[in-house]
Image (cartoon, rainbow, N blue to C red):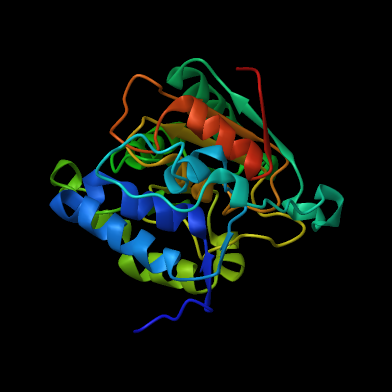
Amino acid sequence: ILFKTEDCIIIDEASQVLDHIANTKIMGSLQAQTWCAFIELLNKANTVISMDAGLSDADLELLVKEANTDEDLQGLAPLSNVKIYDMPINALPEDRQYKPLHVLPDESLVLGQINNCCELIVSGNNHGRFIFACDSVTLPWVVSDLAIDKGISSERILIITGKSNKTAHLDKKQAPKRVEDFIADPDGQSYKYDIIAYSPAIDSGLSLKKNPPQFHNLFAVFQGVASASSCLQQLKRLRTVNSVTAFLDPGRTVKGDTDEQNMLSKANAAGLTPSEI
């Protein structure tokens, strides 16, 4: 495609696009070459519009010349040419407005709250039903085992995660047909489950927004494996939850958009108010 200088380029889900191209873990040896080609393409347009609920200062720092310190990566025009338009929060639908993000200091505290929810489920209290998001292919199975030990039927638990050598013996339990049916109609299928646990196998394109809500709790454990934007996309799958409880491990990071402060910055941009840090 030959772009002319008068073209306007629109990037939807821009934060994810930037994360993908700038992440050496994903792009490997092609990362610098791909990034430079991407910037060259954008530089040919008079206007570039980047749209994403989770856009943050970290994304701008990747794009503008003054903030980008990596000599191998080109940047766009100076920051003075960048205009930022924020949608007033009261203009958003109620299910998209700010929700508290409770950050706990230890992973075990999140699992403790999950354990409490499992007890509620076993007692017949639907307010215990929850969704668990993480950036690990093994943690969903840990949560599943915890729930089954409490007396919850495996038929009431849906695991959605990628394949891994660590979980090869469990992949057959993932029930591809159930996963496929749920992804095709999440609100219509969610009544079948008390617990849904997933890794970044789901991070966009799927929303649970049925009212009254089928799930009342959203828990997350992020260990610095996936990017901040990918983690936040996971948190936004459940639109009707009143708050989010998470553990963020700042000690395990890979190069790119993974550190705790970046996660919190993007959380605030995405409509989550960090608290209890």
8 to 112, vertically: above or below = below
Q: In the image, residue 45 lies at what x, y percent?
A: 49, 71
In the picture, residue 118 is in which quadrant? top right
Quadrant of the drawing holding the N terminus: bottom left
201 to 108, vertically: above or below = below
The front one of 112 and 137 is 137
Q: Give the residue drawn at x 60%, y 44%.
A: 129
Q: Give the residue drawn at x 80%, y 58%.
A: 93
In the picture, residue 16 is in which quadrant? bottom left
201 horizontally vs 119: left or right:
left
Q: Is residue 152 something that shows in the picture?
A: no
The front one of 262 and 144 is 262
How many marks on residues? 0
Q: Is residue 265 something that shows in the picture?
A: yes
Q: Give the residue drawn at x 76%, y 60%.
A: 211
Q: In the image, residue 83 lies at what x, y percent?
A: 66, 52
Q: Give the residue drawn at x 25%, y 59%.
A: 34
98 horizontally vs 79: left or right:
right
Quadrant of the drawing holding the C terminus: top right
